[in-house]
Image (cartoon, rainbow, N blue to C red):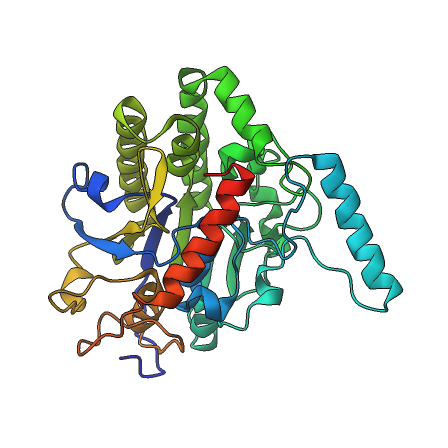
Amino acid sequence: MGTGSTDTGKNLLVIGFDGLDYELFKNYVRPPFDLLPLYAPVPVTGPSWTSLYTGDSVTTHNVRDVFGLEFRRRYARNDTLHLIRWHLHNLGRLLRGKATHKRFATYATTPSKYLWDTLNAGGVDVKLVNMPITCPVREIKGLHVGGFPLVRRGRWYWPDEIAHQIPDDYIDLVDITHWFQDPERDSHRVWRRAITATGFEANRQRVVDTANRLVDLFCELPPARLQMVQFSFIDRLGHVFGVRDEVERFGYELAGSLVGRLVAGVKPDATMIISDHGFMGDEHTDKGCLAVDATLRPMLQVAEGYTPSVLDIAPTIAAYFGLAHPCEGNDLTAGGNYTTRHDEQDEQEKAEITKRLRALGYM
């Protein structure tokens, strides 16, 4: 359990992959990593990544939109109508004397405490690069370079001192979707239509190049005791081409290559690989991945029959640094009887969000 004092000096590298599936990754993972399934109660990008960061369920952190949007796109099938509705919505709020809504309000809408707030309070600096659903960037002890969805206006990195290291086309490194659309304006159909029209083979080298450039940038930026970076190409390619056959091999082999480069470049004391959910065929699954190296594995005390959850990652990372993170999830280093959230509330949340995504054509 966390004690409130940090362990001196040790650092941790956390590598995230959107859609990395436990059942598929078993065929590709190599030593020194030991692989565990990671249960995602609501296997959708926005809610699940926020659970990873906070250790809380969707009903507590209240991020329910796939993009972390505060205002849901009611006219997603028509971008012009959507923008009209959006501006009328904010005009109505102004006329009533209320503050206008922010388009991406991840921090503004959740009462949950984020992992890096706990670590910063305990004296641990943090490096966040391309972690999804963390818009707007925050002034933290360390550095924060924004991730999907990345807005084109305003600041998307902190502190200003790293500006010269951020390439002008950083938004292209963040996510495939940003190659084709503005996340503040366009429906997700824009990027899906574009990449479908050009095909997998026409885009695979660009995926490789941008992912490796993100690794280069991550390794060049100043270090911190907790360093986190994320890649989303498995999920995005899956939504267009399905995760099977050549797309599967390409995605998982590229992921393995990126992990090797990151570990070699950062040289961390310990490394963890996580995902927000799984992806097999054409669908999300609730079985993501938790892979830990030989340093971390002896620290985990996972009882037989218990499946770790996305809610358990934040308190477990905090415990690695000797800190306690207040949340619903379990510290996997503590042992004992873990609380499990495989309950009706999770299923209701999953059904509600999945229904909405299917209506929008996202799933």
Task: From the top left corner, tell me how far across and down residue 329 is, in percent.
Answer: 34, 71
- Position of residue 229 relative to residue 78, above or below, is below
Q: Quadrant of residue 245?
A: top left
Q: In which quadrant of the rendered view does residue 235 lie?
A: top left
Q: Residue at x 41, y 20 (%)?
A: 200
Looking at the image, which is closer to me, 320 or 218? 320
Judged from this view, the residue extending furthest toward the left is 304
Q: Is residue 331 above or below residue 139?
A: below
Q: Could you tell me which quadrant the N terminus lies in? A: bottom left
Report whether residue 143 is seen.
yes
Q: Is residue 249 above or below residue 143?
A: above
Residue 296, image x and y in percent? 20, 61
Taking the spot 16% from the left edge, 69% from the top edge, the residue there is 301
Residue located farthest toward the right when viewing the structure as drawn = 95
- Number of labelled discs? 0
Residue 32 vs residue 243: left or right? left
Left or right, 77 with respect to 66, comes to right
Of residues 113 and 196, the one nearer the viewer is 196
Left or right, residue 21 beside residue 240:
left
89 or 348, which is in the foreground? Answer: 348
Query: Would you say residue 125 is visible in this rendering?
Result: no
Name the outermost residue toward the bottom: 3
Give x and y (percent) for residue 338: 23, 74
Q: Quadrant of the C terminus?
A: top left
Measuring 44% from the left and 60% from the top, which residue is drawn there? 349
Q: Is residue 243 left or right of residue 357?
A: left
> Whole-percent x and y of residue 34?
16, 52
User: Up-down: is 244 above or below 37?
Assistant: above
